Image: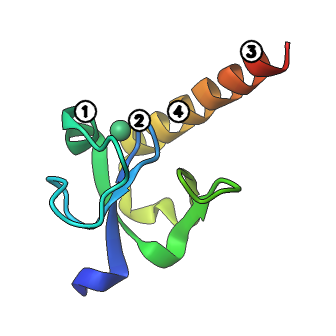
Amino acid sequence: MGKSETIWVCLACGKTSEDRYGNKNTSHGWDESCILNSVQVKKSHLIYNSDRSRVVGIKDPRRLTKNDVKKILDALDEEARQIKKLSL
Ligand SMILES: [Zn+2]
């Protein structure tokens, strides 16, 4: 896959980085946890939140393992909990 077609996405927090180790075009706060939890995804498959600061979903998860998908679902659950907290 071409370098520019893909991006690393942290499945724990939704931050992105062109380079897994955070050297290039990286979300603010890309850290060790992001490196460990990241997977390489086609940019065209990403679903962003409203201000495009975080990835909240992946359109074509066929390349991901079941465990990766579980992490995404857990992250979305966590996000839903945070939103609920804020709206209380
Ligand atoms: Zn992260």
| Residue drawn at the location 44% of the way across and 38% of the way down | 13
Name the residue at 19% across, 54% down.
Answer: 22
Do residues under tags 1 and 2 come within 8 Å of each other at their CB atoms? yes
Residue type of the residue flagged with mark 1: Ser
Q: Is 88 drawn above or below residue 37 in the view shown?
A: above
- Alpha carbon of mark 1 to alpha carbon of mark 3: how far? 24 Å
Mark 2 — residue?
12
Q: Earlier in the sequence, mark 3 or mark 2?
A: 2
Type of amino acid at the residue the image marks with label 4: Ala
Looking at the rendered structure, the kind of residue marked 3 is Lys
Instruction: Tell whether 10 sits left or right of 83.
Output: left
Q: Quadrant of the C terminus?
A: top right
Residue 49 versus residue 11 in the image, above or below: below
Please tell me whether mark 2 sits on a helix, a strand or a loop: loop
Determine whether label 2 and label 4 are within 8 Å by CB: yes
Q: Are marks 3 and 4 in contact (CB under 8 Å)?
A: no
Amino acid type, label 2: Ala
Separation (CA) of disc 3 from disc 4 = 15 Å
Q: Which numbered disc flags the more N-terminal residue, 3 or 4?
A: 4
Q: Nearer the viewer, mark 3 or mark 4?
A: 3
Please give left or right for residue 53 compared with residue 84 in the image: left
Pair 3/2: label in front: 3
Asked whether 42 or 68 is in front, the reply is 42
Residue underneath mark 1? 33
Q: Secondary structure at mark 3?
A: helix
Quadrant of the image occupied by residue 17: bottom left
Mark 1 nearby-residue class (10 Å; few <14, some 14–19, many ≥20): few
Q: Is mark 1 within 8 Å of ligand 1?
A: yes
Q: Quadrant of ligand 1?
A: top left
Contact, CB < 8 Å: mark 3 with mark 2? Answer: no
